Image: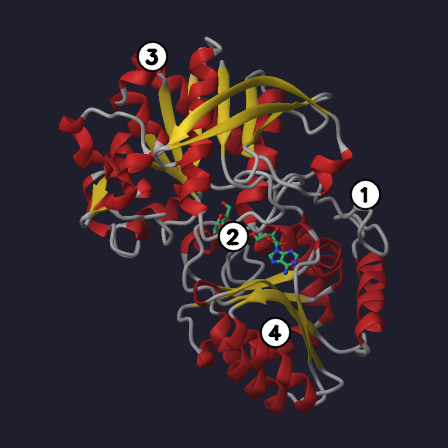
């Protein structure tokens, strides 16, 4: 079975968040299971692309409105990532260092989708499945079915995975002529609330959509930034499949980015060495409990609550707790978090920015990882934390409900709370401080969490079963 995965991000080429981790891992595990899965990404002027060799396998030109652009398809020569990697290169549009936030983002992603369709159409390819991830590639299902240009491919099965239902990629009808000729009798399939909404269109037109956890599937019909009714109506087309983690990249026994290796059977000595390295770097005492946060500093992640919650907790547990933040995002939150350092000089630090190596060391060296998310479609941080023996403190939402059980419950191993509120965060931090005093209990929970299996093996199989179930419609 031949599958193309299309997305804006893929680790290690271009990563902003968990979307990249999933697109960089799922195809690899699908190939190991016997599929022929490839990844198609926009070209990025970044390290992986500069340091690896590519062949140009296709060249053509197309129109975006009235503007003609040339494009090339680049293929990585060695399949070193465990899958065929294709990049779509468009000089002046898809040749930039950053993934998002360019003013012509809509043009970028429309041109990306059109170039992909032109390429597989003109080169006479016949994939079994086109698997699109998030709104950046949400127009593909509609275009396949309702543009005469791609008639040959109209019956190709499309699967659409929602990693984040808060973002839709919507734009106004003034950009309608960026699309090729489409069957106007079906143009309503592009629309939500008087605009072109790629996420809504994908949900309406794909053969099946998936969410990255079962709980998130249920949540979308009550919270999806205006698409609730659509998710309610299209519920029968949806399936929740929990993300896995790439256990080759995220393995405390072999991870080259951490200070000392450790195993699930004997984690304590190695974990302590990582904690010592981390604490030394930031001037903390390794004897105190260390609670960390890694992530985008946005409202969805509950980051705006952290300055007040940390002030309260660090005051309440004065001299008995260290907190480490790694993240970037909302400027006000960044500033408020940075200022806390002056108030708690020996017990608090914020590292503003993106740092993959530091993230690995934080997962390995912290005692607890805090995730007070308002919305969390799956969450990978808690899965990495569990694998590295770091106890997750999570709000019960989305994928966090499906992956973390409170240690107070039978067989549990985390700290869970109900509300994204300062009170709940502080209460949970107090539970962590108390738990830290009980070394035997903490060590038992650590063994328990490190014995869990969140590898891709099971979830990759679920996607394959889903593809198989759609085959008769091919
Ligand atoms: P999301 O995709 O919503 O940001 P996930 O939990 O799925 O959340 O994945 C986040 C991924 O991005 C994880 O791999 C995490 O380690 C990484 N990450 C987030 N922020 C940073 C940062 N500032 N530095 C390094 N890694 C980060
Ligand atoms: C999104 C979600 C996150 C999920 C990731 C990978 O960015 O916010 O919860 O883990 O995608 O699916």
Helix, strand or loop under label 3: loop
Residue where numbered disc 2 is placed: 379
Q: Does the closest atom of ligand 1 sit within 8 Å of the Cβ of label 2?
A: yes
Decide if residue 38 is on the left or right side of residue 145: right
Q: How many marks?
A: 4
Decide if residue 282 is on the left or right side of residue 153: right
Decide if residue 449 is on the left or right side of residue 165: right
What's the CA distance linking mark 1 and mark 3?
Answer: 42 Å
In the rendered structure, which disc, 1 or 3, sits on the residue that comes first in sequence?
Answer: 1
| Mark linked to residue 474 | 3
Q: Which residue is drawn at 25% across and 34% down?
A: 204
Helix, strand or loop under label 1: loop
In the rendered structure, which disc, 4 or 1, sits on the residue that comes first in sequence?
Answer: 1
Helix, strand or loop under label 4: helix
- Figure check: 289 above or below 83: below
Q: Do the residues labelled 4 and 1 touch (CB within 8 Å)?
A: no
Query: Farthest top residue?
Result: 124
Q: In which quarter of the image is residue 187?
A: top left
The chosen color scheme is secondary structure
Q: Which residue is drawn at 64% across and 51% down?
A: 384
What's the CA distance linking mark 3 and mark 2?
Answer: 33 Å
Q: Is the residue marked by circle 3 packed among few (<14), some (14-19), or many (20+) residues within 10 Å?
A: few
Q: Residue at x 61, y 91 (%)?
A: 315
Residue where numbered disc 1 is placed: 254
In the rendered structure, which disc, 4 or 3, sits on the residue that comes first in sequence?
Answer: 4
Residue where numbered disc 4 is placed: 432
Residue 223: horizontal and vertical position, in percent?
29, 57
Q: Nearer the viewer, mark 4 or mark 1?
A: 1
Residue 133: horizontal and vertical position, in percent?
45, 37
């Amino acid at each position: 079975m031949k599958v193309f995965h299309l997305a804006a991000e893929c680790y290690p080429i271009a990563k902003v968040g968990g979307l990249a981790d999933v697109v960089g891992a799922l195809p690899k595990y699908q190939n190991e299971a016997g599929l022929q899965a490839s990844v198609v990404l926009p070209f990025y002027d970044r390290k992986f692309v500069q340091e690896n060799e590519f062949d140009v396998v296709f060249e053509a030109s197309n129109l975006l409105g009235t503007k003609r652009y040339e494009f090339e398809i680049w293929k990585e020569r060695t399949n070193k990532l465990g899958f065929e990697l294709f990049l779509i290169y468009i000089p002046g549009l898809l040749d930039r260092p950053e993934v998002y936030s360019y003013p012509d983002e809509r043009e970028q992603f429309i041109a990306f989708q059109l170039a992909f369709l032109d390429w597989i159409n003109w080169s006479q390819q016949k994939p079994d499945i086109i698997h699109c991830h998030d709104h950046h590639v949400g127009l593909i299902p509609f275009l396949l079915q309702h543009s005469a240009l791609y008639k040959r491919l109209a019956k190709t099965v499309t699967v659409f995975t929602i990693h984040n239902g808060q973002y839709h990629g919507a734009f106004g009808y003034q950009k309608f002529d960026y699309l090729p000729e489409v069957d106007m009798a079906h143009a309503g399939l592009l629309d939500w609330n008087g605009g072109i909404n790629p996420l809504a269109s994908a949900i309406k037109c794909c053969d099946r959509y998936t969410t990255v956890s079962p709980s998130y599937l249920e949540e979308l019909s009550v919270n999806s930034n205006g698409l609730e009714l659509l998710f309610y109506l299209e519920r029968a087309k949806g399936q929740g499949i929990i993300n896995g983690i790439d256990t080759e990249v995220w393995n405390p026994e072999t991870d080259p980015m951490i200070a000392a290796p450790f195993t699930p059977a004997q984690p304590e000595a190695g974990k302590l060495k990582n904690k010592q390295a981390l604490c030394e770097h930031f001037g903390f005492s390794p004897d105190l409990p260390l609670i960390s946060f890694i992530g985008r500093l946005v409202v969805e992640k509950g980051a705006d609550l952290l300055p007040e919650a940390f002030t309260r907790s660090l005051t309440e547990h004065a001299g008995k707790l260290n907190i480490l933040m790694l993240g970037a995002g909302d400027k006000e939150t960044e500033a408020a978090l940075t200022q806390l350092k002056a108030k708690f000089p020996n017990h608090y630090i914020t590292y503003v920015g993106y740092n993959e190596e530091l993230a690995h060391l934080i997962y390995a060296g912290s005692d607890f990882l805090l995730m007070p998310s308002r919305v969390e479609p799956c969450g990978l941080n808690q899965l990495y934390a569990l694998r590295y023996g770091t106890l997750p403190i999570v709000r019960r939402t989305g994928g966090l409900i499906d992956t973390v059980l409170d240690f107070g419950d039978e067989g549990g191993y985390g700290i869970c709370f109900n509300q994204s509120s300062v009170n709940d965060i502080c209460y949970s931090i107090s539970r962590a401080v108390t738990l830290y005093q009980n070394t035997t209990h903490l060590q038992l929970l650590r063994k328990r969490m490190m014995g869990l299996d969140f590898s891709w093996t099971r979830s990759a199989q679920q996607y394959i079963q889903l593809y198989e179930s759609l085959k008769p419609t091919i």
